[in-house]
Image (spheres, grey):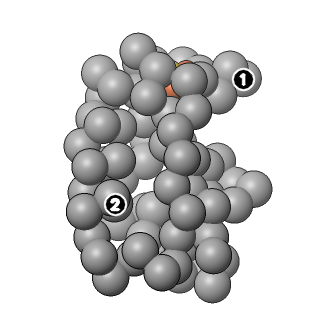
Amino acid sequence: MVDVKICVGTNCSFKGSLDILEYLESDESLSETIRISTHSCFNKACKPNNAPVVMVQDELILKATLDKILLKIREKL
Ligand code: FES
């Protein structure tokens, strides 16, 4: 299982993190592979230019997109 923590704080929600969360939760092909949780803010990485921020295992992804997240999940498997 790969841990995926999605920031749902103000900056990140504003930049689309809730859409990412919704997509990852609804993709059944990932349900056996990832464990999704939400995070209120990755304080040190919290800058408007970095949002949305997502952590995959121990790595922060800045300006996260679905492509970047899915690639990182594959690397961690
Ligand atoms: S709101 Fe997402 S890192 Fe702070």
Q: Quadrant of the C terminus?
A: bottom right
Which residue is nearer to you in this view: 41 or 46? 41
Disc 2 within 8 angstroms of ligand 1 (CB): no
Circle 1 SS class: helix
Task: Kindly identify the residue that appears in the image at 30 percent across and 37 percent down.
Answer: 18
The disc labelled 2 sits on which kind of residue? Answer: Leu
Please tell me the numbered disc located at residue 24: 2
Instruction: Name the residue rendered at 44%, 41% in the picture.
Output: 63
Q: Amino acid at mark 1?
A: Lys
**Residue under the image location 24 percent in, 43 percent down:** 19
Is residue 57 among the parts visible in the rendering?
A: yes
In the image, taking residue 57 as reference, residue 9 lies left or right, namely left
- Crowding at label 1, few (<14), some or many (≥20) Cα neighbours within 10 Å? few
Q: CA distance from mark 2 to mark 1?
A: 24 Å
47 w.r.t. 58: above or below: above
Q: List x then y, in percent, for residue 34.
A: 52, 70
Occupied quadrant, residue 41: top right
Residue 66's label in the rendered image is none
Q: Nearer the viewer, residue 8 or 52?
A: 8
Nearest to the observer: residue 26 or residue 16: 26
Quadrant location, the N terminus: bottom right
Task: Report the residue at 51% width, 55% height from top.
Answer: 36
20 lies left or right of 50: left
- Residue at image mark 1: 44
The image position of residue 39, as x and y in percent, is 57, 33
Q: Considering the numbered disc 2 on the image, is that residue within a helix, a strand or a loop?
A: helix
In front: label 2 or label 1 = 2
Which class describes the residues within 10 Å of circle 2: few (<14), some (14-19), or many (20+)? many
Q: Position of residue 42 (x, y in %)?
A: 65, 28
Q: Earlier in the sequence, mark 2 or mark 1?
A: 2
Residue 61 visible in the shown view: no
- In the image, residue 57 sits, relative to residue 20, either above or below, namely below
